[in-house]
Image (cartoon, rainbow, N blue to C red):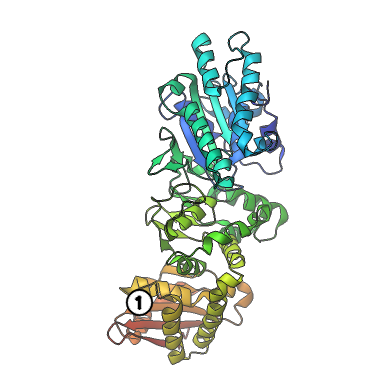
Amino acid sequence: MGRFLNPDNSAFQTALNSEIYVDKTGLIDYTNRVINTKQAFICNSRPRRFGKSITADMLTAYYSRGCDSADMFAGLKIGSMDSFRTQLNKHDVIHFDVQWCLTPAKGPENVVAFIEKSVIEELKLEYPGILDDTVVSLPGAMSQIHAATGNKFMVIIDEWDVLIRDEANNRAVQEAYIDFLRGMFKGTEPTRFISLAYLTGILPIKKLKTQSALNNFDEYTMLDAGVMAPYMGFTEDEVRKLSEKYDRDFAEVVRWYDGYWLSGQHIYNPKAVVSVMLRGTFQSYWSQTGTFESIRPFISMNFHGLKTAIIEMISGNAVEVNTNTFQNDMVSFQDRDDVLTLLIHLGYLAYDQVKKTAFIPNEETRQEFLSATKNKEWNVLAEFELQSKELLEATLDREEEAVAADIEKIHTEYASAIQYHDENSLSSVLTIAYLSSMSYYFKPIRELPTGRGFADFVYIPKPEYRADYPALLVELKWNKNANTALQQIKNKQYPASLEQYTGDILLVGISYDKKDKKHQCVIEQYKK
C-alpha cells in the first residue's frame, strides 16, 4: 500500500461515512466490461462539485491491490452484479490528484517530475530488482515492469486538467505535461502495460489544432455524456427520493437545481442537492465553493453577440452554439461560441445536444449570472432592466401602445443582433424584453400544452406574489395582426391549462409587421 501505487480505500470510506451518499457504483460494472479493450481509455470531465473525486476514489478502492474492499462494496449496487468479484482488488493501481501535487512539487513546472519520481520510487519497492537508477520515465518504468512480469496497471488521474486551466499562459508547463500524458497513454506500447485509464477533470482533453492530444480516449463531457450520464451527477429519481426522505419541496428543488440534460436524463449538481437537503434553505450553494469572479472576464469579452446571448439566457431563452471550435483550454477563444462552450464545461450553462443550444440550467446559476453582471462593464444590463420593468408595468396596467413601443425600443437598443425572420426570432426578443418579470414570476414556460394547442409563453407568478401579480398568457404572431394572436388564445382555449390557478390571468397578443416594422399589442383580462 502506497500513496500513489495501490492506495488503500480510506478516501472512499469517507464518502460512505457521510450522512448523504448516493450510490454510483454501477459505473464499476461498465469499467469492468471495458478492461483491456479499446474502450479502456476514459476521460470523464464535469464541473466542480459534481463528484469527480468521489468517483476516482471509488474506482481506486475497488481495483487497488493495496486493500480489501469486499465488505465495503458488498452492500452497494455493484455488490449484486455478476462482475462484482471478477476484478475486486486485483490490480496495480496508480492514482494521483494533480491539484494536490502542486504543493509538494513546489510549483507547476515541477509537477511532472514530482509525479514520475514519486511513483517510480514506489514501483521499485513493489517490484525490487527490475528498475535501476537510470529509469526516470514513469511510462518507461511501467513498460519495463510489464516486460519482466506481464503485469498491467490501472491509471486513475483526478483533476487531470489543472495545468491546462491554471497554467493556461505557461506554454512550457503545458507542453511538458501533454508530452507526459502522451507517453503514458498514446500509441501501441501503453496498451501493453495499461489495462484501464480513467481521467477526470473539468475540461475535455486539450486539442492540438483540430485533434485531441489523446485521441485514443473515449470522452464523456457536459456536451455528450453518453453512457456516463447517470454517473455525472444526481439523477432525477435520486433527487426525488432524497426530497422525500428530508421532506423538501421537490418542485422547488427542480426549479433551483435541475436543468442539466445529459443523454436524455435530468442531472443535478450533487453539491447543491446535498446542501439543500441538509440545510433546508433554497439558495446558490455551488457558488460558495468558488467565486463567480473567475468567469466575469469571459462573459465580458468583446465578441460579437456575446452579451446579447448572455442577456437572452438570463431572460430564460436558449441560444445556438457551435461547440466544435473550442480548443479545450482557457485562452484560445476565437468567438462567442468558444466562450459559451467553456461555460458549458464549467457547468454555468447547460447544453441541448439535439438542438445544439446553450441555456442557463436553473435558478441557482441564473442568480450567479446576475451577480456576475453587476459591474461597470455590464451597465447595459442595469439600464436594460429599468426598461424591462417599465414594460412589465405597462403590461400589467394594460397600456397596449406603451407595451408595443417598449418592445420596439428593447429590440432596437438591446437585441439588435436578433434579426426578425419568424415567430422564433420574435420569441427571443420577447424573452429578453420581459427579463424583469423573473423577480416576480417563474421562468416563462414555452409552448405550454393547453386546451387545443400550445401557448407561446405562460408566466406564472411565484406564490408570494400571486395576490398582486396576474398570470400572463402570451401569444405571438409574426407579420400578422395582434388581434389574431388574441383570438387564437380564445379559440384554442389556452386559459384551460390554468384552470387550477386561482389568481387573475391576463391574455396578451403581440405581433410584428415586417412591412411597417412595427409591433402591436392587445391585452384583455380573462374572465373565469
- Label 1 CA crowd tier, 10 Å (few <14, some 14–19, many 20+): some
Q: Is residue 520 visible?
A: yes
| Residue 515 in the figure: left or right of residue 358 | left
The image shows residue 71 at horizontal and vertical percentages of: 66, 25
One can see residue 57 in this view: no
- The image shows residue 346, relative to residue 453, as above or below, that is above
Residue 154: quadrant of the picture? top right
Residue lying at 50% horizontally and 50% vertically, measured from the top left = 345
**Residue lying furthest front:** 172
* Of 344 and 83, the residue lying toward us: 344
Dot 1: element: loop
Q: Give percent across and percent down for residue 247.
A: 67, 55
Tell me what residue is drawn at x 63 percent, y 24 percent. Answer: 117
Q: Nearer the viewer, residue 457 or 378?
A: 378
State whether residue 315 is above or below residue 335.
below
Residue at image location 71% in from the left, 36% down from the top: 14
Instruction: Report whether 521 appears left or right of 299.
Output: left
